[in-house]
Each structure stands twice: as C-alpha cells, then as structure tokens.
Image: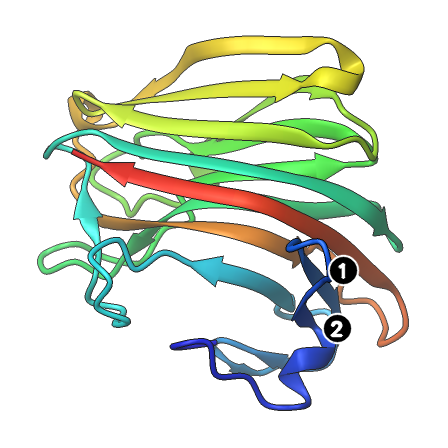
C-alpha cells in the first residue's frame, strides 16, 4: 500500500475494521516483495513499512549513528497456523553505498505466544551482517493478548521494551545490542505487521490485529 491505495485483491489481506484497528492477514501465495517464489523458498507477509519523513519512497531511511529512533507497535496475534511463528516488527537495513546486503537486523517474533528477539551481531572478518551471526532472546509470553512492543535506537545502541496489561508484563527499556559501537553503518527503517514464517503449502494462514503504531525520530 502506498498513499492508502489498495486493490481489491490486496484488501483481502489488509483492511480497516469498524473499531479503527487494522487486520493484517496472510498466507503463502507465491507473491512476495522480491518477486514470485516457489514453496520452500521465500515467505509472504502483510506489513507496514515506515516512511519516516513522509516521502513514500524506499530512499526514506535513517542511520543509527544519527539521533534517536523509536517504534511502538500495539497489536495482538489472532492466530498463526502452520509452525506458529510470525514476525510482528523489524528494524530492517537498506542497501547502503559501500556495504553488502540489506540485513533484517532486528526481528520481533511471536512464536506460539512467546515474544522473541532475533538480532544480528557483528560478523567475522568484514563479512556482511546476516543471520549467520544472530542472537535470540525469549522475552515473555503474551499469548493472544494485546501488547505493545517498543524498539529504541539511542547513541547507536538498540533497546527493547514490552507491555502487556492482561499478562501483568511491564519490561522497561533494556539494552539489546550496541550496533554503532560494533561498526554497523546501514540505512534503516521500521516495519510492523504479520510476516508469516510458513512456506510449506498454500493453505495455512496467520492473522494479526494492529491497534496502534507510532514512530518517532529526533
């Protein structure tokens, strides 16, 4: 979706509800943002991609060594079939001059009710930043309740926080990783939604209800 324009086919996967929330539904269809895909290859997703300066262009990105960058996404996972995994938020790296790749730097995953962090760490011998060098943390169990996940980049360091009133969870900002201190220099953008970790058939589905999303940069 760009400038709120959706086709009828796209509206099956992303639509506004009467209460002002948004349903983000997905299944493997073979069509991804990077082209068509066979089973067992890429994953499908229904997500919002941040345009932090409002430019509606994939050139609209930010660097971790400049300013403070915050994402707060409030949602609940209605259901995830298949393997029970979907990514609900990301900090994604963008192709950047002088660097190789476009790393999925930080992924926030809902895994059968548990919120997990999956984040890249510094690679060896000037290799690209990839999942070869990632760390994983189980944060807390939210099940299908409403929760707010927060990411903050400040002074080049990445912090996370989690709130879920129904589960009495209130985790204040906690240091995840010092990216700039470890040489990370990519452009970045935030994403939130329903990045379904399933590509074994065309039948299984996942659905997320997005209630509020806020980004801030200063």
Label 1 sits on a secondary structure element that is loop
Furthest residue in direction bottom, as rendered: 8
Q: Position of residue 108 (x, y in %)?
A: 56, 37
71 over 158 or under it: above or below? below
Q: Inspect this view and state whether residue 186 appears.
A: no
Q: How is the image coloured?
A: rainbow
Which residue does the image show at 55% across and 61% down from the upper left?
47
- Disc 2/disc 1 C-alpha distance (Å): 7 Å
In the displayed structure image, the side of residue 44 where residue 201 appears, left or right:
right
Q: Residue 35 carries which label?
A: none
Q: Position of residue 76 (x, y in %)?
A: 73, 40
Task: Name the one closer to the observer, 175 or 99.
Answer: 175
Which residue does the image show at 27% across and 57% down from the upper left?
94
Q: Inspect this view and state whether residue 56 appears.
A: yes
Return the disc, 2 or 1, that comes first in the chain's sequence: 2
In the displayed structure image, the side of residue 39 where residue 81 appears, left or right:
right
Residue 144: image quadrant is top right
Q: Which mark is residue 28?
A: 2
| Count of numbered labels shown in the rendering | 2
* Crowd rating for badge 2 (residues with CA inside 10 Å; few <14, some 14–19, many 20+): many
Disc 2 to disc 1: CB gap under 8 Å:
yes
Q: Where is residue 6 in the image (x, y as percent from the top left)?
A: 55, 84
Which residue does the image show at 61% across and 65% down from the upper left?
46
Q: Which mark is residue 198?
A: 1
Q: Position of residue 174 (x, y in %)?
A: 43, 11
Label 2 sits on a secondary structure element that is loop
Residue 165: image quadrant is top right
89 over 160 or under it: above or below? below
Task: Name the one closer to the observer, 62 or 2.
Answer: 2
8 over 133 or under it: above or below? below
Furthest residue in direction front, as rendered: 18
């Amino acid at each position: 979706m760009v400038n709120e324009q959706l086709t009828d086919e796209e509206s099956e996967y992303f639509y506004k509800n009467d209460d002002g929330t948004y349903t983000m539904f997905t299944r493997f269809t073979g069509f991804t943002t990077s082209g068509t895909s066979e089973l067992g290859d890429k994953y499908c997703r229904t997500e919002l991609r941040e345009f932090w300066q409002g430019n509606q262009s994939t050139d609209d990105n930010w660097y971790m060594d400049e300013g403070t960058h915050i994402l707060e996404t409030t949602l609940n996972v209605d259901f995830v079939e298949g393997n029970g995994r979907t990514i609900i938020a990301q900090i994604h790296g963008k192709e950047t001059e002088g660097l190789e790749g476009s790393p999925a730097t930080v992924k926030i995953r809902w895994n059968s009710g548990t919120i997990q962090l999956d984040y890249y760490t510094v690679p060896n011998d000037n290799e690209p930043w990839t999942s070869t060098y990632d760390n994983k943390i189980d944060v807390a169990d939210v099940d299908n309740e409403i929760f707010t996940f927060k990411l903050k980049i400040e002074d080049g360091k990445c912090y996370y926080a989690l709130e879920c009133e129904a589960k009495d969870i209130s985790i204040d900002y906690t240091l995840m990783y010092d990216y700039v201190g470890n040489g990370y220099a990519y452009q970045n953008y935030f994403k939130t939604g329903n990045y379904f970790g399933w590509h074994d058939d065309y039948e299984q589905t996942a659905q997320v209800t997005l209630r509020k999303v806020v980004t801030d940069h200063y």
